[in-house]
Image (cartoon, rainbow, N blue to C red):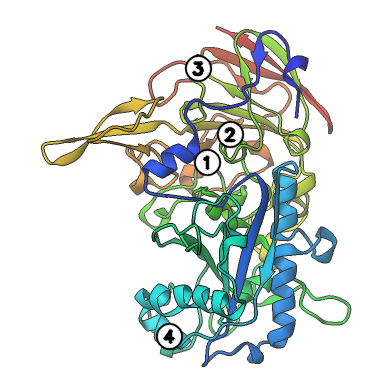
Amino acid sequence: MMLASSLPSSTYTPTAYALDYRTIRTYEGYRTSTPSMGEVPVLVIPVSFSDYSCDQLENGCEGTKEDIHTAFFGQEEDLRWHSVASFYHASSYGQVTLSGTVSDWYTPSISAVELSNNSGLLNSRLTLPALQWYKDTYNTTGQEFDSDQDGYIDAVYFVYSVEFDPKDEAFGEQKDVFWAFVSYIGGLANASSPTMFHYGWSSYKFLYNDGIIQRSENGKFLFDEDSNPLFEPYRDEEGRLKVNAHVFIHEFGHLFGLEDYYSYDRSKGDWGALGALDMMDYNVGDHHPYSKSVLGWTYPTILTDSVTLTLSPFQEEGQFVLLTPQYNETMLDEYLLLEFYTPTGLHAKDASEPYAGRYPRQFSIPGIKVTHVDARVAEYRFIDNRWQFTGYVTEAPQQNGIRYDLAHSNTASRSLNPNFKLLHLLESSGNNTFINGGYATDATLFGVGDGLADYTFNSGIQLGFRFEVISISETEVVIQFTRV
């Protein structure tokens, strides 16, 4: 990362935040999250159901268990892309190292079909007994998985032996339990025998979810008799399924405390403000500068006056610009972020081919990504027997009768103001094509000669800067910023 001493005098880089992300998450009820720095242990428990046993899988119990280990802890060269561990080591610029254990298969007392029809039993009949089974079977208290010693296991992940979205009618219509998600279950901390506050949950099938969708001569998808695209997963020269970790990497972002950046309300007319091209949006590429900064992996360059800056690729050093008329010593505010994107590093694979044969491709050219961030914190006071919004704050002292939340989300129904997005990727054209259901494309990026002459935030405050992209190469970009 760029050293503060090498920056022009009209810029500076903070090394800490007065109001940090984890503090607000704690106010929201998230008592812990997976540590995002240092050596972090991960416990992975494969789940084999009595009616959908792991020995029925293509690679059997042992082969699938090996693939699970590869997906979580393998070296980059062991996969077509990264494992969870190698991805996060690269994404964090070497600041987080995931390691851990894949246990033997656990068989719960509840069958897969029973669970699908009674998903409320997931924790009482499966995840909590599975953790106790692990402690009993391996004669451990689990303290080795609590690196921050907060009484909660840092990260638990369950990989189950059923396909996601199973087609068997016995699973019923409400089978959402067989998908991929992170669940927050609470529970009291226990330093002597750490408990489970949150966990990841995904199908074994996501291990093999990268491949090619068969197409007709004119490029359209081909479908089977059940209207599913004809999908062929990648295999090695010996015909063995190749392992992919995209979904597990995305879900692990939730364990660190990150939100989804797609909208849950698209069926209701809401739109995807980040254009799909982010790990916490459509599971592709690297994490956004906002995500990395709130996790402590990198810090922004703050501008205090007019300056011409040369930026290196965000992929390489984590350098990015935070543009605001007044920086309040926090990322939990409203501002613009600028990063120099290149189709390299963690972006390279998804820039060259569509993940799973159908996902939007990452940008294929270098350019500037400009994001409007509205991560302001809302204060609520308990007045007249209900919580009422009383304003946005940049300080959050703990007081009785007051609570704090991140005000906005990329899902309209989860935002204080449904028209305000947490992260909105601006388009170089000045238009908003995402609002009509579009995804980001190379044309979204700001290139030479592009810029903003003025900008107004959701708060009504003017940006106070204009900027123009002066030059771009594969290794650096020059941007002229003018205070107005």
Q: CA distance from mark 2 to mark 1?
A: 8 Å
Bin the neighbour count of mark 2 within 10 Å (Cα to Cα): few under 14, some 14-19, many 20 and up: many
Instruction: Please tell me whether mark 4 or mark 1 is closer to you in this view.
Output: 4
Give the position of the C terminus as an image quadrant.
top right
Image marks 2 and 3: residues in contact by CB distance under 8 Å: no
| Spot occupied by residue 446 in the image (x, y as percentages of width and height) | 67, 30
Q: CA distance from mark 2 to mark 4?
A: 43 Å
Q: Is residue 480 visible?
A: yes
| Spot occupied by residue 86 in the image (x, y as percentages of width and height) | 75, 55
Provide the residue designation for mark 1: 433
**Secondary structure of the residue carrying numbered label 2:** loop
Q: Earlier in the sequence, mark 4 or mark 3?
A: 4
Provide the residue designation for mark 4: 171
Q: Earlier in the sequence, mark 2 or mark 3?
A: 2
Q: Amino acid at mark 2?
A: Glu
Provide the residue designation for mark 3: 463
**Is 51 drawn above or below residue 271 in the view shown?**
below
Residue at 45% from the left image edge and 34% from the top image edge? 375
Image marks 2 and 1: residues in contact by CB distance under 8 Å: yes
Is residue 276 left or right of 235 when viewed as pictured? Answer: left
Q: Nearer the viewer, residue 358 or 186?
A: 186
